[in-house]
Image (tube, rainbow, N blue to C red):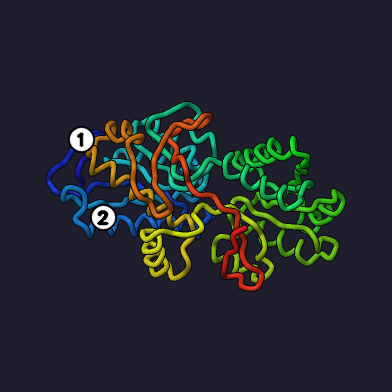
Amino acid sequence: MHTPPRPPGAERTDGSAIRIGALVPLTRPGWVEAGRHLLAGLELAVGEVNGAGGIAGRPLELVVRDTAADPRRASAAVDELAGLGVAALAGEYHSVVARAAAARADALGLPFLCSSAVLDALTEQPTQWVARLSPPQSRGWQVYADFLLGAGHSRIAVAAQPSVYWASGIRILRDHLTPRGGTVIELDAGGLTPAALSDELVDHRATALLLLVGHPEPAVPIVRSVRRDQRLAGIMIGAPAGQPEFTEWATLLGAEGAAIPFLRYRPEHLGPLGTRVETALREHLAEAPSFVAFEGYDTITVLTDLLRTHGTDRVRTAESWQRVDVAGTRGRIRFSRVPGINVWQWTAPPIQVVDRDPTHPDRFRLL
C-alpha cells in the first residue's frame, strides 16, 4: 500500500521514522570507494542514534540514492526524496554533483548538509537551506600551495581533465602561487597519453606534477608512467584532491603510490569520540576508514542535534544552522557565514597534507 507523502515540514508524533535522504556515489563513474566510506559513516551514526532511542522515540531512517557522479541524477534524486517527505538531505562527495543537489534543495526549500564536496561555489546565490562540513576548496588548496612552496617547488605542472572542480583548483593554485614566484603549467590529461605527458614534464622542467584527474583512470597509469621514467626521477607527484587516501590506490600502485602528498580533513590526533568511531568504522569497512567516513558520521551527528532541538520542520532546521554547537569526531562543529561562500560553513574543519610512507605504504605521514 502506498502512503502519500505528507506536506513538507509537517510534524509527526506517531513513532514513525524520521527520514533523511542520503546522496552517495555508489557506482562508476562515481568514486565508488569514497561513496562506500561516506555511506559507512552515515549508517554507523544512524545506527547509534537508533540504538539510543532515536529522536523523541522516533527512529532515523536513511533513504539512500546513488548519484553515480551524475549531476542530473542527483537533481532527480533530490526531487524524489523531497516528495518522500525527508526531513533533510545528507552526503555527496563529488563537488559538481553536490552543486546540482544544492541548487535543487535550495529551490525546493529542503535542508541539505553537504558532507564532502569542497567547491567554493556550491550555490550561485546565498542560501539558508544548505550547509557544509568539508572546508571550501580555496582554503584547503591554499594550504597545499603553501606546502609546495615550502618544499621548494616553483615550477608546478598540473595534469587536468575538464571539470568545474579541476578548473577551480587550477585557479586557486595559480592565484596563490604566481605572486610568490611560482609557475603553474597546465597539461591536458585527456589529450595526452601518459608517455606524452612525461615528455611534457621534461620539456617544461617541472619539479612537481599535480594529478587533477579521476581515479583510478587516468591517475594510476600516469603515476606508473612518471615513476618509471628515469628522466623524472626527482619529480614530486601530488594529488591535492585526495586520491591516495583510499585503499584501492595502495592496492593498484603499491610502492609507486607512496610519497604522493594529498589533502586530508582530519586532525593529527583524534579525541575519545573520534577514536571510538574510528574503531567501529574499521570493523564496518574491514579497512582503515578515510576522512570521508568521518564526514559521513559527523553529518548525522549535526542533523540529529538539529532534529532533537528544533523538530523535523524543514524551515526551522534551515533557520538553525548558526545555532549548531556539537562535538564531532574531528572537532567542535559550528557553522557561520564565510566571505565568498554562499552556504553555511563549518568554520574550522581540520586540514592536513599527508602522504603514504614509502617504507610502509599502508601508513600515512603528516607533512
**Distance in Å between CA atoms under marks 2 and 1:** 22 Å
Residue 357 appears left or right of 237 = left
Say which element carries label 2: helix
* Residue receiving disc 1: 10
How dense is the environment of label 2, judged by Cα within 10 Å: few (below 14), some, or many (20 and up)?
some
Q: Position of residue 177 (x, y in %)?
A: 72, 40
* Residue receiving disc 2: 49
**Residue furthest toward the bottom?**
359
Q: Residue at x 35, y 50 (%)?
A: 327
Q: Nearer the viewer, residue 251 or 283?
A: 283
How dense is the environment of label 1, judged by Cα within 10 Å: few (below 14), some, or many (20 and up)?
few
Give amino acid for label 2. Answer: Val
Residue 277 in view: yes
Q: Position of residue 280 (x, y in %)?
A: 37, 66
Q: Residue at x 22, y 39 (%)?
A: 311
Q: Nearer the viewer, residue 30 or 240?
A: 240
The label shown at residue 268 is none
Q: Nearer the viewer, residue 333 or 15?
A: 333
Quarter in which the C terminus is drawn: bottom right
Q: Position of residue 56 (x, y in %)?
A: 17, 47
